[in-house]
Amino acid sequence: MSGPDKTQGLAGQRLLLCVGGGIAAYKALELVRRLRDGGAEVQVAMTAGAQHFVTPLSFQALSGQPTRTTLWDSAAEQAMGHIELARWADRVIVAPATADLMARLAHGLADDLVTTLCLATTAPIMLAPAMNHRMWQHPATQANLATLRARGVQVVGPNDGPLAEGESGPGRLAEPHEIVAALAGQAAAQVPQDLAGLKVVVSAGPTYEDLDPVRYLGNRSSGKMGFAVAASAARRGARVTLVAGPVQLPTPAGVDRVDVRSAAQMHAAVFAALPADIYIGAAAVADYTPREPAANKIKKSSESLALDLVRTPDILAEVAAQTQALKLVVGFAAETNNVAEYARRKLEAKRLDMIVANRVGIADGGFESDQNAMTAYWKDGERSFASAPKTRLADDLMDLIVERLDA
Ligand code: PMT
């Protein structure tokens, strides 16, 4: 897939990577390699805990620089003192940021090399947290996170998924390519911050409507379009909540993600995320759900089976109709035929500010594909976007959204 260079903006940057003591420390090795591939100069500092997981020598081999492990190394201090190192950095990345390290940073401790460097630097700091999901969700960690964010620290991840202890939840270190993309995004000063101060809620992916404990009604949405839209809004400075149906995609940098399964759950999560300035409904929400999911597996009996389905709430129409005035409500329309006509009908019927229509049921676009083509319609205008990667289309759509905000 062609697309923007994810390492753009890293060339020539002096990056100080602080590695915390978690199993995810091994992924920081890959991060060093990718940062250097992007043209950055990388120096690595490790906590004592980190050295239990990965050796300083490994980082030294990949960074091409001596790895710093302690405040009390007179030879290293002679080469470049820790204050000098803190000044040297254009940016500091803490990956993995463990719960303990976040707590120490939030409280301004300087009890080892890493915390001292973070306290002594004036460079922007980015954290990539990784820990057990219960530790991540603990109010103490969330309070530390809020403190650090309030001080301007950027946070990428953690991702949701299987954790080292055999459990699953939010706590996985963001993938190295996501951290690189987040850093590059931070560096890309050319990205206009024209959504700064605005809250954007995006829905993405399919919904699954359970028929019984083993079967469900679903659809082919992969979430790629909605995730790209959420990522694009976040890059432009918006606070973004992404309400995601069941998809296998990493959380875009800087986006708050709420995972749901059914249309009813998506409805609840969207309304919980309001108030907002902009709502973008890119999810393929089921229009019908079983009246009563069976408590036990439905058994084969007769030759045919009729399902008793009832309408789901129309999330988009309800958002557009609610009293808190959003600045812009944008829907998507997935159509197999009469695309323009059906899209305009939905624009009117659901009282939207804009609808983005795309053809589905085709090989190279719509559901699942990395590419798409679409046309946005509003009351007295329209704009077509030729086939392109969904990531690029999301940026073009965001340009239009910003234009329509000012219209
Ligand atoms: O996820 P991908 O694989 O990347 O594919 C992208 C996409 C094709 C899913 C996306 O581009 C798209 O078109 N999303 C809308 C799909 C859809 O359900 O369209 P619709 O025409 O059925 O619904 C119209 C609008 O109403 C949509 O904004 C939908 O989110 C919303 N809706 C529909 C039903 C419902 N109960 N609640 C809703 O909010």
Image (tube, grey):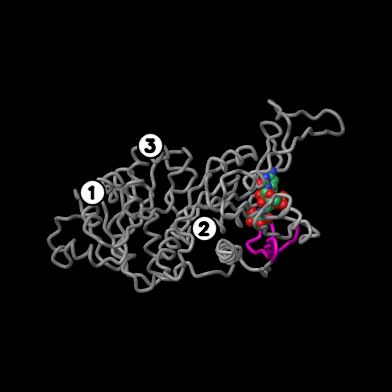
Which image quadrant: the C terminus?
bottom right
Left or right for 292, reference 179: right
Query: Which residues are drawn in magenta?
Result: 361-381
Based on the displayed image, in which of its 4 quarters is residue 36 positioned? Answer: bottom left
Q: Which residue is mark 2?
A: 231
Q: Residue furthest right?
A: 303
Q: From the viewer's perspective, is 290 left or right of 248?
A: right
Residue designated by label 3: 138
On screen, residue 267 above or below 301? below
Q: How far is the residue under mark 1 from the one under mark 3?
A: 20 Å
Q: Amino acid at mark 2?
A: Ala
- Residue 368 magenta-highlighted: yes
Q: Nearer the viewer, residue 312 or 54?
A: 312
Residue 147, percent across and down?
A: 32, 47
Q: Position of residue 242 (x, y in %)?
A: 54, 49
CB atoms at circles 2 and 1 under 8 Å apart?
no
The answer to the question of whether label 1 and label 3 lie on touching residues, with beta carbons closer than 8 A, is: no
Q: How many marks?
A: 3
Q: Position of residue 256 (x, y in %)?
A: 48, 48
Q: Residue at x 38, y 38 (%)?
A: 135
Q: Is residue 323 magenta?
A: no
Which numbered disc flags the more N-terminal residue, 1 or 3? 1
- Residue 397: give its label: none
Q: Which image quadrant for residue 196?
A: bottom left
Q: Amino acid at mark 1?
A: Gly
Q: Gap between marks 3 and 2, in whole Å?
A: 26 Å
Circle 1 residue: 108
- What amino acid type should be assigned to the residue bearing mark 3? His
Does the residue at mark 3 contact the one at mark 2 (Cβ under 8 Å)? no
**Residue at image location 67% in from the left, 55% down from the top:** 332
Under tag 2, what secondary structure? helix
